[in-house]
Image (cartoon, rainbow, N blue to C red):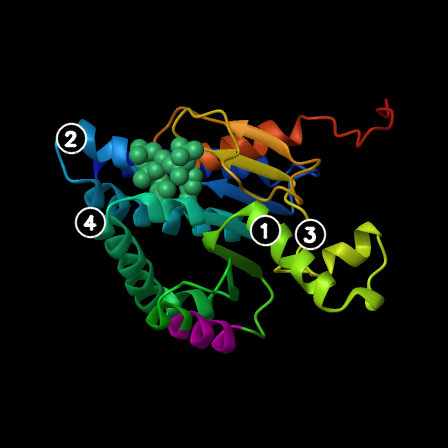
Amino acid sequence: MFSLNEYLDEILSRYYHFKIKKLKNLPSHVAIIMDGNGRWAKKRGLPRTAGHRAATRSIRKIIEASLQSKIRYLSLFAFSTENWKRPKEEVDSILKLIEEQLKENLEELNSNGVKIKLVGSRRNLPEFLIKSFEEAEKKTSKNDRLTLYMLINYSGRREILEAVEKIIENPDSFEAKEEKFRELLYEPEMPDPDLIIRTSGEIRISNFYLWQSAYSELYFTKTLFPDFKKSEFFKALMDYSRRKRRFGGLAEF
Ligand code: IPE
Ligand code: IPE
Ligand code: MG
């Protein structure tokens, strides 16, 4: 079922997509801090959980847009280690919703060539969620069109500390080099995000990809995540394509 807003978004997206197809410097890895679900619900007098449910629609649209624009890696920050501080009912409903959505969309994601990866500490995640992700990871492991990293129970500091733990357990095999340290992170093969988008108007990183974001381009928007649509995703890609990345060197003119 389409709302008028979605219909308009689709028309605008087609126009942007047409422009994007001609761009050369698109990001290869886009990461999104999906924020503002609670505020979206509050504005409508709904419970926070309604905001999380509405966010699943935005997620499907972003995956669709990533496939269309040939993005190779997409990271979605869905639940941080700090989010355990929230009321148990909200935490339970977020984790259940993620699992339900994974099951519901798995066939379609797989047939579209999406490889799924769970990123985060598995230490205190419920067994049912780990099991569903392990099945999804196995089923989609040979896909290579788009890798979807779902960050659940993730914290950048925790990731670094878990890497340090591995060094302490086996100090002789470690050399203090960036490439060696990277091998100890959750996803050693993952390229750093080129573009990090944060919705909801907050201008902060909130413990996301601390090691990997060293040279990422940042894009902040006031849009609350459940309102974040395909056309805005494409707009962020166009914005990125106009930036000059220097990595500490000098720009080429
Ligand atoms: C993002 O939306 C989802 C999670 C962090 C799990 P929030 O739930 O943080 O929504 P706000 O920031 O309270 O509006
Ligand atoms: C960041 O959102 C984490 C996720 C989107 C999963 P938060 O809502 O937890 O961040 P803060 O508390 O506003 O920094
Ligand atoms: Mg928030």
Amino acid at the residue labelled 2: Arg
Residue 44 circle label:
2
Main SS, magenta region, reads: helix
Image quadrant assignment for residue 243: top right
Secondary structure of the residue carrying numbered label 3: loop
Residue drawn at x 74%, y 26% as measured from the top left: 244
> Cβ(mark 3) to ligand 2 < 8 Å?
no
Residue 1 circle label:
4
The residue labelled by disc 1 is 70
Secondary structure of the residue carrying numbered label 4: loop
Amino acid at the residue labelled 3: Pro
Rendering quadrant holding ligand 1: top left
Q: Which of pointers 1 and 4 lies earlier in the amino acid sequence?
A: 4
Verify whether residue 244 appears in magenta: no
Amino acid at the residue labelled 4: Met
In contact (CB < 8 Å): disc 3 and disc 4 = no
Q: CA distance from mark 2 to mark 4?
A: 20 Å
The residue labelled by disc 3 is 191
Q: Is residue 169 left or right of residue 123?
A: right
Q: Which of pointers 1 and 2 lies earlier in the amino acid sequence?
A: 2
Q: Nearer the viewer, residue 22 or 251?
A: 251
Indicate the position of residue 169 as horizontal and vertical percent values.
Answer: 71, 68
Indicate the position of residue 32 as horizontal and vertical percent values.
Answer: 49, 41
Q: CA distance from mark 1 to mark 4?
A: 26 Å
Instruction: Report the span colored magenta.
Output: 131-140
